[in-house]
Each structure stands twice: as C-alpha cells, then as structure tokens.
Image (cartoon, rainbow, N blue to C red):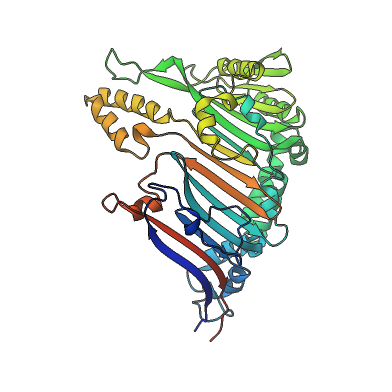
Amino acid sequence: MIRKTLMTAATVWLAWGGLAGAPATAQTQAPYEDLPDGGRLDQAGTVYINIKTGDALARMAPYWFRGMQTSDGPVAPGMEGLEKLYQAFLTAGGRELDQTGFSLSRKGEYAIAKTYATFRGDTSWRKALGERPHVFSSLLYAPKGTLFFFSQDMDLKTVVALLREFFVATKNSEGSKQFEDFLNSIKTDTDYSVEALLESYNGEICFFGDVDPENRITPAGSPPDAEGIAMPRLALMIKARSDVLFTALKAEAAKKGTQFEEKTSGPFQIAIDAQPVAGGLLRMTMAYDKNYLILASSPEFMDTIIATKSDYSNLGNDLDFLRVRGKLAVSGNALSYLSPNLPNLAVSAGALVAQKFGLPPSMIQGMMAQAPGGDAFGGYASMRINDDKGFQILRAFQPMDPSDLPALIQGASIGMSFNASMGMTMDATPGQ
C-alpha cells in the first residue's frame, strides 16, 4: 500500500463579485508565505492554485507504471510506452520541476489567466525556450489589421540535443536513426551542414497573417452575386544572424527546379518564385534584411511587409492589438495574438457556405453569435516570460468563455462567483 502525505493549506469560499462583479478585496486575499509564487499569480483572483511538487514526481514515477505496489520489477502491461515517455520527460528536466500554479482574475473587461513553473537548477527545457525576455521586434513587420500573430523563442541547438536524449531515454534506436538520416539529408539538399544552419539561426520563429480584401475567391456552385472569400496572406519569419538560411533555402528550391526572380529593396534581398502555384493564388517569395528570413505567400504581401517595416504602420501600433496585449507585459519570450475581427471573417465565410447550400446567411450568423466569443469577442493574447527560475505564461481574453472553470462554477442561475484559493505541498513518499 502506498502512503501519500499531502500537507495542504486550503481555503474555499463563496463571495459576491469576483470575476462576475466587484473585484476581490484585501480581505479575500489568502496569505501563503510557505508557498510564495514570487508575484507570478493573483492570489486574490477568482481561482488561485499553487503547488510545490518537490521531487515527488520523480520518486513516484517507478510506482505509477508498476501498479502502485512496488518500484522494482517489470512495468505493468500496456504501460511500457508511457513509462518511456515519462522517463524522457524527467531526463529533459521534469525531475527538476519544483513549483507550479495557476490563477484567474479579471482586469476591466478582460479575464487574465496566469500560469507558472519553477525548477531546481538549470534544465534543458528552459534553455530550449530561449533566454531573457525581450521586446518583440517581429511586430514591426506585421501590418496593422493582422488577424493572427505568433512569435516563439526557441533554441534549436538545444531542441536537437533534447531529441537525441529522448531517443536514448526511450531506447528508440529506429527513431534515432531516422532523425540522424534527416539531419544528414539537410546538407544534401541545401549544401550546408546542420551546424552551419543552426549557427545562422538566431532564436525566434514568427508566423502571422491577414486577408486581402482585393483578392477573393468564389467556390464553385456559389450564387452569381456571392461576394467571395478574401484570400489569406501568410508570412513565416525566422530570425537570422546571416544570409546562410536564405541562401540554403534558395539552393534547396533550385535543386527541385524552382527558378527565382531576384531583386533588392533597401536592405532586403528578395527572391520570387517565377512560377505561381494553386491557380496563381500562391507564389512563394523570400527575403532577408540582416535580421529576419521572411517567407511570404505572394510578392504583393512581401511588398506590404517591407512597407510596414519602413513606415511603422505595424501591428505594434494597432489599437485592437494594444487593447488586449496591454493587459499583459511589454517584453517576453513568446507572444500569441488573435484579432477581434476573426469572428467577422468566420461569419463571412459561413455566409458564403450558407449561400452555396441554399441556407439563410442569418443562420450562420446566429450560430457564430452563440459561439464562445461571438459578436463580443474582444481578442486574445498570451505571453510567455522567462525568469531565473522558470517561466510564467499570461493570457488575456474577452468575454468569459462558458467553458472556463469560473463560468461553469458560477452558473447563470446562481448569480455569484466562486473564489477558490489553494496552496499545497506534495510529499508523495512510497511505503507500506
């Protein structure tokens, strides 16, 4: 029999207000001096959970996969794969996980969710997620009105090392061979070694897009007066120290028969695929400006990106973006944003589908209005911020989605919010 010891300090109470109404007061804030979150969470939030795991995850692992009765002997039938994955997780830094927590509160019309994790010492996972927080210079390339934007710090050298560790920890020799074969094929395709490409890469990957109102398609069978769907415009950016990645991609494409039209625009070296694809809707365009390698879905969108970088009409100055991102922070290591205009795009596409099948457009619009966010969707933003001990993830969204925990607990018919605050230390000591 396994003996589990949970030393728990918990307070649960019902309070008027909270997320649904008035903000929590000082009287509702529960002190957890024994489990400090370092200011990473809102202790007075509608939900506050803070857990110190210590080394319990690593000590309990041998039991979890052996029927909880012993740490020795064979792994339980059917648990072999999970046991390997968990060992890889521990090897990559999971055994160093020390503390984690979550809070949910309200800031004006937005809900603010905070999550964090701290580790004992350095871990490979932490290094893979980037270094110090920074301003997001990639915002300078995304035009105002961008519908979605994702930026992620990632140390690919560490990611490669982690994957190699994973194959060793899971004793997956076949997977390891396939991975090494893939790395070797990169040099064959690009004329550059993986090491050279990783040296050129500078730690950030970014993806964003919007739609082109001047370029629309109308699916076959649509009514003659159908307005059509605005075509998406997409861009992928990779921060780079040199033009090695740009040159390598051109070399790989050339070996596959692609011909490029090349030109320059200020600091930008530009290469445009001479042959459009997908009926002329897609024409790969690459550029490098000594900061980012940029891949755009069309030469026209690349021109927009270059103009945006020059005239400062970028997403960082977009009022919709500032409204939701302003609830978070300025600097970080990962940033995600969804525009308030995304539901409008969905309604437009849905109305076209409704027309095609003879359904009233109001039906689709009504469905969208009832969906999470609906007409009142105010946008979404999240940010990961690294620190000396781990990382914090902040999220801002509006309005409250019915699938969120507080909304479920609150219930429209009850009319009160649920404020659950909990601090916990976990000491899972196996024993009889």
Check the image and report above or below for 325 versus 62. Answer: above
Looking at the image, residue 82 sits to the left or right of residue 169; the answer is left
Q: Is residue 271 visible?
A: yes
Q: Residue furthest bottom?
A: 432
Instruction: Determine if residue 171 is in view.
Output: no
Please say if 322 is above or below 328: above
Q: Residue at x 76, y 32 (%)?
A: 241
Residue 131 drawn at (x, y percent): 72, 45
Height in image: 111 above or below 44?
Answer: above
Front in this rendered view, residue 149 or 107: 107
Q: Residue at x 61, y 41 (%)?
A: 334
| Residue 159 vs residue 334, the one in the foreground | 334
| Position of residue 136 measured from the top left corner of the image (x, y, whole percent) | 65, 33
From the viewer's perspective, tell me whether residue 409 is left or right of residue 255.
left
Q: Position of residue 403 (x, y in %)?
A: 37, 49
Q: How many marks?
A: 0
Q: Quadrant of residue 367?
A: top left
Q: Position of residue 355 (x, y in %)?
A: 26, 22
Nearer to us in this view, 381 or 32: 32
Q: Foreground residue, 169 or 363?
A: 363
